[in-house]
Image: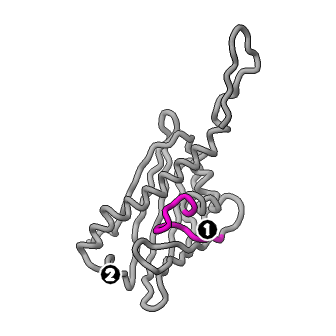
């Protein structure tokens, strides 16, 4: 019986319905916003090449990104493995960091979306499936455990918060009740967003 692969899991509530969250995830171009522009400079997507339209099982895309406390950059090639609207979105990533003695790793990124009162709950699970030539911090057992228990969840939670915020922003106009056109005996109050 082998050792379980390193895994980090983060879960957040979201005011948007599961369909709205899923639609943001399946539109791969949005990943550059919530996983790139809205992220801190030390851990974010820098580029993403993907076809237009909602990603489906088998959709392939590539991206580059920064790595905290490193001058190396990720070069990723990913494939969507689960695309179950309003329930789950998953992709596996073949990642390379650096040129000489490049770290090569394979990850599974899974987003599970469950309905909750007032919206949904989004759970992100990152699993390292394989790794070769790890950077020193990932090669030393104690440091690797600390990285997976603290650093990766902290960094990944930023992205999940950004995803939730973007889903809520995009869903707000569609899910907000329309103001009544008939106003009698009172004042109408409007706000601009």
User: Residue 18 occupies which quadrant of the picture?
Assistant: top right
**For residue 52, above or below residue 19:** below
- In this rendering, would 99 be left or right of 30? left
**Element type where label 2 sits in the image:** helix
Calculate the distance from the C-alpha at mark 2 to the C-alpha at mark 1: 33 Å
What residue is pinned by disc 2?
Answer: 136
Above or below: residue 47 compared with residue 119: below
Residue farthest along the top direction in this orientation: 185
Magenta-drawn segment = 36-49
Q: Earlier in the sequence, mark 2 or mark 1?
A: 1
Say which element carries label 1. Answer: loop
Question: Residue drawn 65% across and 62% down?
Answer: 29
Residue 121: image location, x then y, percent: 47, 44
Measuring 43% from the left and 56% from the top, which residue is drawn there? 157
Q: Position of residue 89 (x, y in %)?
A: 54, 57
Residue 11: image x %, image y %? 41, 50
Model colouring: one colour
The crowding category of the residue bearing disc 1, from other C-alpha atoms within 10 Å (few below 14, some 14 to 19, many at least 20), is few
180 left or right, relative to 28: right
Tell me the quarter of the picture where residue 16 sits: top right
Q: Is residue 25 magenta?
A: no
Q: Position of residue 71 (x, y in %)?
A: 45, 80
Q: Nearer the viewer, residue 154 or 81?
A: 154
Q: Which residue is mark 1?
A: 58
């Amino acid at each position: 019986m082998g050792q379980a692969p390193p895994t980090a899991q983060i879960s957040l509530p979201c005011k948007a319905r599961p369909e709205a969250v899923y639609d943001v995830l399946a539109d791969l171009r949005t990943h550059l916003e919530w996983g790139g522009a809205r992220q801190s400079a030390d851990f974010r997507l820098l580029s993403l090449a993907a076809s237009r339209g909602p990603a489906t099982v088998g959709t392939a895309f590539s991206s580059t990104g920064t790595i905290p406390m490193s001058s190396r950059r990720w070069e990723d090639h990913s494939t969507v493995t689960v695309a179950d609207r309003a329930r789950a979105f998953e992709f596996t990533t073949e990642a390379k960091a650096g040129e000489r003695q490049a770290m090569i790793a394979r990850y599974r990124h899974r987003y599970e979306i469950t309905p909750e009162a007032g919206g949904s709950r989004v759970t992100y699970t990152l699993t390292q499936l394989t790794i070769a030539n790890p950077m020193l911090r990932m090669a030393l057992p104690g440091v690797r455990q600390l990285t997976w228990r603290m650093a990766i969840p902290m960094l990944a939670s930023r992205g999940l918060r950004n995803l939730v915020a973007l889903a809520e922003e995009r869903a707000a106009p569609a899910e907000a009740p329309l103001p009544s056109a008939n106003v009698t005996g009172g004042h109408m109050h409007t706000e601009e967003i």
